[in-house]
Amino acid sequence: MTPTLLVLGVFVILPILYAIFLSLHKVQLLGGIEYKFIGLRNFARLVEDEKLRISLKNTVEYVLIVVPLQTILALILAVTLNSGIRGKNWWRILYFLPTVTSSAVLTLIFMWIYNTNGLLNDFLGVLGIPPYNWLGDSAVALKAIMLMNIWSTAPFFMVIYLAALQDIPKSLYEAADLDGANTWQQFLNITVPMLKPVTFFVLTMGIIGTFQLFDQSYIFSGGTGGPNNATLTIVLLIYQTVFRNLQMGYAAAIAFLLAALIITITLIQRQFFSEKL
């Protein structure tokens, strides 16, 4: 076990301990690294930071919309492929392509689609609708990222659902069919209950992933979180705090806030599902 323990210690435990150390200090980076102990002041500052509240609101809104929709879409795609449609192997490849494509590349493609001279406005122009600056509208920018991520992440969870669907005994469906249950009733009373453990996993991984949204928001806004902080997320704020404001201690405090949020929501979700598993 020694090699594994060494890897965990160097790459997991030590960074956590160092982050705790940083959160309790004011770090001077210019002119040589200096640490000044300030106790819990970085954590107290979290309550007063307006920009943190904005990033938290954006992130929570993103999680509440993306996680349910990507889970539902993944389940629909999996059920469709599991139903025995023609050419299902080709459909699997086609559906899974967004997942294996680089996130940065997908973001650039969608930026081109949303651009004033992009594909979306060209399509709307055919319908007689004037062009619109989708990326420049604070009410639309975050939704644009949501749509892209739902489309690109649902296929990954689709594969997980598909594997679980193939493990459900066909005898259950045959018995339900003999009892007169239609397709919809079989789905609600057999498929959905049998997939609850997998759904818990999908929701947990979805929540963890969406709370850590960074690269798409960074590329869309050029690292600013704009327009008007509409795409500012917690992880992007951590990046700005470290690499623009050079406040490593406060960034570590924000990171612990994010970790606490993810752990709390995961535990609540686990408690909710444990009663039904």
Image: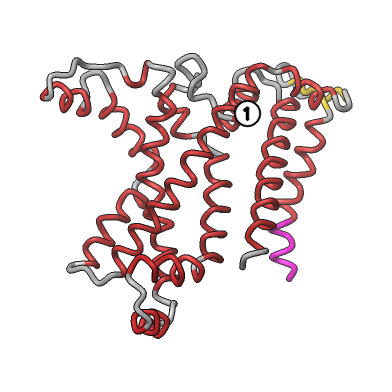
Horizontal side, residue 56 vs residue 8: left or right:
left
Q: Is residue 159 visible?
A: yes
Q: In the picture shown, does residue 134 fall above or below 101?
A: above
Q: Residue at x 40, y 24 (%)?
A: 141
Q: Residue at x 29, y 65 (%)?
A: 81
Q: Indicate the amino acid at tag 1.
A: Ile
Q: Position of residue 42 (x, y in %)?
A: 79, 24
Instruction: Out of 126 and 21, give the one closest to the viewer.
Output: 126
Instruction: Out of 5 and 275, give the one closest to the viewer.
Output: 275
Image quadrant where one finds the N terminus: bottom right
Horizontal side, residue 207 vs residue 47: left or right:
left
Instruction: Out of 103 and 49, give the one closest to the viewer.
Output: 49
Name the chief secondary structure element in magenta. Answer: helix
- Which coloring applies here? secondary structure
Image quadrant where one finds the C terminus: bottom right
Q: Residue at x 21, y 63 (%)?
A: 90
Q: Is residue 201 located in the magenta-colored stretch of the structure?
A: no
Crowding at label 1, few (<14), some or many (≥20) Cα neighbours within 10 Å?
A: many
Residue most toward the front?
Answer: 180
On the image, numbered disc 1 is attached to which residue? 238
Q: Magenta segment, which residues?
A: 1-8
Mark 1 lies on a secondary structure that is: helix
Q: In the picture shown, does residue 42 fall above or below 269?
A: above
Q: In the picture shown, does residue 276 fall above or below 204?
A: below
Q: In the picture shown, does residue 86 fall above or below 222?
A: below
Q: Position of residue 162 (x, y in %)?
A: 39, 67
Q: Is residue 11 visible?
A: no
Q: Is residue 5 located in the magenta-colored stretch of the structure?
A: yes
Horizontal side, residue 84 vs residue 38: left or right:
left
Q: Position of residue 121 (x, y in %)?
A: 20, 23
